[in-house]
Image (tube, rainbow, N blue to C red):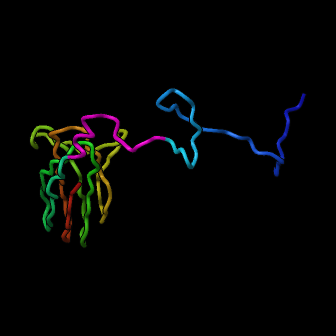
Amino acid sequence: MPPSQVKLPAGYAPAFAVGYSDGEGNLVLAGTADPLPVALGSGSIEVQLAESAPPPEPLAGSASTSGLAGPFAPVAGRAVTLALAGAWEGTVQLTRSTDSGVTRLPLTAGGLPWGLYTANACEAAWWESEDGAELYLEITLASGEVEYRIAQ
């Protein structure tokens, strides 16, 4: 038997419903009067507590020669925003350390370079998950001056 073909416009629409269990275990259909009881959250108590911690002071400055800027000690469980501005040529690499800067590793995602910049940018560059980690900027300039700011 050949498969059935559905041709539009059809004279019907399939109906689906979403529901949840109320405090007594009864099904309540979600709707305008009864929206789904959800809240945005991070999923762990430790991160939720960190989200109430005050953010660290931003790391901001400018560089006209190659060098190192940092450390910036982010609060775990929050995005880290990096802004780069100015007329410059070179690279700015965001690196991470868990031993007070003795070892600084470049950020990667899926084994590929991450947080490596050759032009001005303003973006959430990292999401820190570990207390005590520090971020640094390794600046290698060919010319110009770069202004930088790392903040949460």
Image check: 125 left or right of 22? left
- In the displayed structure, 20 sits above or below 60; it is above
In which quadrant of the rendered view does residue 31 lie? top right
* Residue at image coords 13%, 40%: 103
The answer to which of 66 and 137 lies nearer the viewer is 137
- Tell me residue 22's x, y (percent): 50, 32
In which quadrant of the rendered view does residue 150 lie? bottom left
- Tell me residue 59's x, y (percent): 15, 58
Q: How many marks?
A: 0
* Residue at image coords 15%, 53%: 56
In which quadrant of the rendered view does residue 82 lie? bottom left
Which segment is the magenta one? 37-52
Q: Which residue lies furthest to the front in this view?
A: 24
Q: Is 140 a magenta residue?
A: no
Q: Is 45 a magenta residue?
A: yes
- In the displayed structure, 16 sits above or below 79; it is above
The answer to which of 114 and 82 lies nearer the viewer is 82
Quadrant of the rendering where the N terminus is positioned: top right
Image check: 123 left or right of 142? right
The answer to which of 43 and 147 lies nearer the viewer is 43
Q: Which residue lies furthest to the right in this view?
A: 1
Quadrant of the rendering where the C terminus is positioned: bottom left
- Tell me residue 135's x, y (percent): 18, 48
- Tell me residue 89's x, y (percent): 25, 66
Image check: 132 left or right of 18? left
* Residue at image coords 55%, 29%: 26
